[in-house]
Amino acid sequence: MSSSSSASANGTHASSKTAARTDTFSGVDYLGLDDLLPTEHKLVRDAMRDFVKRSVSPIIEDYAERAAFPEHLIKELGDVGAFGPHISADYGGGGMDQIAYGLMMQELERGDSGIRSTASVQGSLVMYPIEQFGSEEQKQKFLPKLASGEMMGCFGLTEPDHGSNPAGMTTHFREDGDHVILNGAKMWISNAPFADIAVVWAKNPEGRIHGLIVERGMEGFSTPETHGKWSLRASATGELVFEDVRVPKANIFPGVSGLRGPLTCLSSARFGIAWGAIGAAMDCYDTALKYSLEREQFGKPIGGFQLQQKKLAEMVTEITKAQLLAWRVGVLKNEGKATPAQISMAKRNNVAMALDIAREARQMLGGMGITGEYPIMRHMMNLESVVTYEGTHDIHLLITGMDVTGINAFA
Ligand code: TGC
Ligand code: FAD
């Protein structure tokens, strides 16, 4: 159970400093979906679950309270294969399929959405575009180090005035011999404060979007940290500021231009989030279920009251539906058939499902639910970012709406 080793459901109170949790999570599989997974998927999933129990659960509440990113986890994340499991083994990636990737994101987000963010940005938004659109030289130079965690990356698409509508971006570059000169700013960028490289999307003088790899240390490039977040507190977020940054032309992706480039990366990351959100939901459900069997009021466990059972029954039902949705999109993605709109549906549904479950589970713990003795409030706050980034809940609804009607309702 995801409860504190120093607190029980019967009458103890939150300590002033959050104690390390004893994490006894063992999965949520109401419909026997494990039968759909081959042994290698289960091994990958269980290895990541062990990593989370060993290295994330004991420390994460403390880091979230202090709004600090646990940088010491980077090496271990690399060692357990969390960076680019779906990237070719030729370049240091895991060479695994999409369902293996999804299961890894599920387990990481069961630990914390911020840790999953770090891994999914690295794998889907930095390594993936380099693999898909980069030159052979870029692949050789960056991918093996990104896979091991020796080098960390971030992804700059969003700007202060262009979030849901990245096509309006104003970050731009002009040619200067064998370099380009980059100007502009990105904001809300996960991993920016410590990243060694940034995959940046910017317009050329003709207004066409291109992807560039900007390296820390290039003159005029800075990454100020964003403070004051009540969500994703254990993840480092920042800006990317470009003031006449000279970027070698060799750092531009030769293989793509236009908004299709960044949106292709987002399809990969959104798929991972559809799985990740299940992890957060499972942790909230598991915590609430166990608490409801221990906590007594009116002379019996609160899990014996119909209103509490309704919450638990609905939670496990919604988790099961989300698992099926993620699994099916994973099968389609492995076959190269998943459409961006299908991925949008899975991201939107599963994150909303997790947020609803976090809110219900929080209530089931009464006052204890607002403390860091249990993981639910942290998941709930994290999910407010997850429901916003990688396309907001409403943007994904509009993507589904456009897909079924053929009519664009964005503008
Ligand atoms: P639109 O005209 O629809 O499309 C432009 C071109 O892109 C293609 N395309 C896609 N390709 C691959 N995957 C997708 N999901 C795609 N969606 C569209 C499309 O076929 C077209 O190609 P081409 O070759 O014909 O040019 O573009 P639009 O300007 O109308 O925009 C559509 C809209 C609103 C859906 C899109 O802009 C959008 O998705 N907006 C949301 C922005 C967003 O998600 N930002 C995320 C920033 S990164 C982030 O949040 C990381 S958080 C990481 C973490 O911490 O985990
Ligand atoms: P806006 O686009 O201003 O939207 C505000 C509201 O208006 C939303 O509710 C939206 O749904 C609604 N809206 C907008 N357009 C329409 C429309 N046409 N019809 C109906 N409603 C509409 N970005 C990156 O590039 N890289 C990152 O690593 C990254 N990490 C992030 C980490 C965190 C913690 C957060 C919070 C964000 C991150 N983002 C990142 C940015 C994220 O992708 C954007 O916040 C998101 O795309 C929404 O953009 P916005 O915040 O500018 O909101």
Image (tube, rainbow, N blue to C red):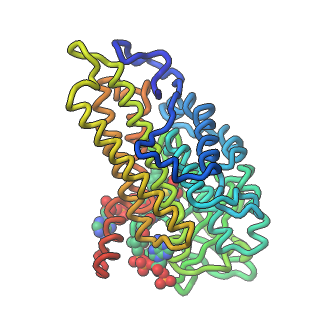
Apparent side of residue 210 relative to residue 109 in the rendered image (left or right)? right
Q: Residue at x 48, y 40 (%)?
A: 233
In the rendered view, tell whether residue 348 sits above or below residue 234.
below
Apparent side of residue 141 relative to residue 234 in the rendered image (left or right)? right
Q: Nearer the viewer, residue 175 or 132?
A: 132
Tell me if I can see residue 192 in this picture: no
In the rendered view, tell whether residue 207 sits above or below residue 12.
below
Apparent side of residue 170 relative to residue 174 in the rendered image (left or right)? left
Q: Residue at x 43, y 24 (%)?
A: 373
The percent coordinates of residue 258 (x first, y second) are 53, 80
Q: Nearer the viewer, residue 114 or 80?
A: 80
Taking the view exactly as shown, the residue that stands out farthest to the bottom is 206
The percent coordinates of residue 155 (x first, y second) are 57, 61
Apparent side of residue 136 relative to residue 395 in the rendered image (left or right)? right
Q: Residue at x 38, y 13 (%)?
A: 12
In the rendered view, tell whether residue 200 sits above or below residue 120.
below
Determine the quadrant in which ligand 2 lies. bottom left
